[in-house]
Image (cartoon, helix red, strand yellow):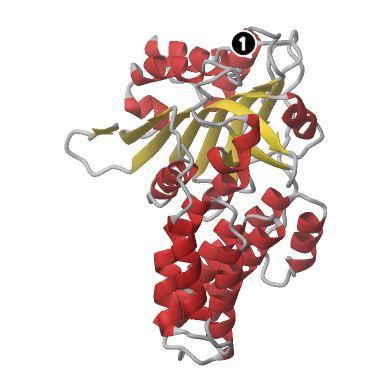
Amino acid sequence: MVITQQDNGEQTVTGTALLLAAAPANKSCLIDATSVLPALAAVPPSALTGTAAASVVELADPVDPQTVLTRIRTAAAAPGPLVLYVAGQLHLDHRQRLLHLALARTTPSTLRYTALPWHWLTGELALRRPDTTTVVLDLVADGDAWGQMRGGGFGVGPGVRLFGRVSPPPPRRSTAVPGYLKTYASIWRDGHRPPLAQLHAQAAGEAGPGDAVFLAVDGGPGSVPVAPRPSVPAARQEVAPAVEARPHADPHPAILAAAQSGRHGEAAAIAAMWESTALRTHGAGSPEALHWLEVRADLARLAQDPGRSCELWMAAATARLARGEVTGTEDVEAAVDRAHHQWEQLGDPAQARALAASLTRLRRAVPGRRPGALEAIGRRISALENVPATP
């Protein structure tokens, strides 16, 4: 659902609000995430974005992480301010030690394929201009995700304002409610428009529970210290450290250190920030921007996310061809070879099928130096046709 509110007469900046509420539709559900959507839908769109004109996109219990990523990417591409509201639950992938936002079909055994990796979200937000993005969270974490989040392994990346609550798992046979976000909606429906920092303080004081972590990072102009009521633990900044995009700073050691220590979301966010700087400074298709695109592709490989790595390597190869590099050059061949290799690592037949057509087009243009690469894709596609789709 998309709602557009136009200001009467004058041209104004249009803000975008993306409302994402998701939780498993099975016994793994920890929070009634979508119960907050009617309350937020009753709020004027301008209150959600803090702008006179606003577009609101609502995602209620989505089932496909790629669809969610596409919606986030579209919202992040909007030129005006972006406010992302998220109600849901966090889980930890035990193999990769990465946080995921559960979606409607998520179960513990299918987490890596049916949930949204948190670093996908932070990677898209990192491409936006600093200080134009705000994230408001009302999340419940399962036991393992709660431990990692409390240890500082959680954030939304640099240059993003953050307010929210993350709660531990509710008692057995009970389901949490997004009371923190419902407090925001209640105040807005009464006609009040306090700054987000003030809203956060009031919601934190009313929502509880006492052992929840309240996050407040307000780096905008005129920002004020943020703290909930005394009965609630003081707000904490749980954003992972990052490296500023200074002209003479070399971010590669920090990125590699983060990836090697398992902080893949942090590494991807730093690389995406530098890519954004390269795009603004040198333009799309520039060698500088291509370098950071390929860094992100390799970081996805290190995070054992072959699907994302394949997509990024294909994007790098396509960009090199678009800027006039010939098919036989080393950089072009290397990008296609790496995309092909990551595609071969995909264990999910549906994802492999989805990427096969794009990879085949690239292989026809860039056969590579090892004979039979195109034929190998065809053989695997034929084999995949006999694998039933996951219900």
Q: Position of residue 8 (x, y in %)?
A: 18, 33
Instruction: Please tell me which residue is depicted at 39% across the width and 75% down the height of the picture.
Output: 361
Pick the residue in front: 78 or 220: 78
Looking at the image, residue 377 lies above or below residue 231: below
Can the viewer see residue 285?
no
Amino acid under disc 1? Ala
Lateral position of residue 124 relative to residue 189, left or right:
right
Residue 126: where, in percent of width, then height? 56, 52
Task: Please state, as top left, top right, bottom left or bottom right, where the N terminus lies in the image.
Answer: top left
Quadrant housing residue 243: bottom right
Residue 296 occupies which quadrant of the picture?
bottom right
Residue 339 screen position, x and y as percent: 56, 70
Q: Nearer the viewer, residue 319 or 370?
A: 370
Q: Residue visible at 45% across and 34% down?
A: 63
Q: Return the residue found at the far front.
A: 386
Crowd band around label 1 with a 10 angstrom C-alpha radius: few (<14), some (14–19), many (20+): some
Q: Nearer the viewer, residue 370 or 53?
A: 370
When the figure is inspected, residue 359 is found, relative to residue 260, above or below; the finding is below
Q: Number of callouts in the render? A: 1
Instruction: Decide if residue 300 is in sight here.
Output: yes
Q: Is residue 160 above or below residue 286?
A: above
Of 29 and 248, nearer the camera is 29
User: At numbered mark 1, what does the secondary structure look like: helix, strand or loop?
Assistant: helix
Tell me where residue 175 appears, x and y as whole percent: 60, 11
Return the residue at label 1: 207
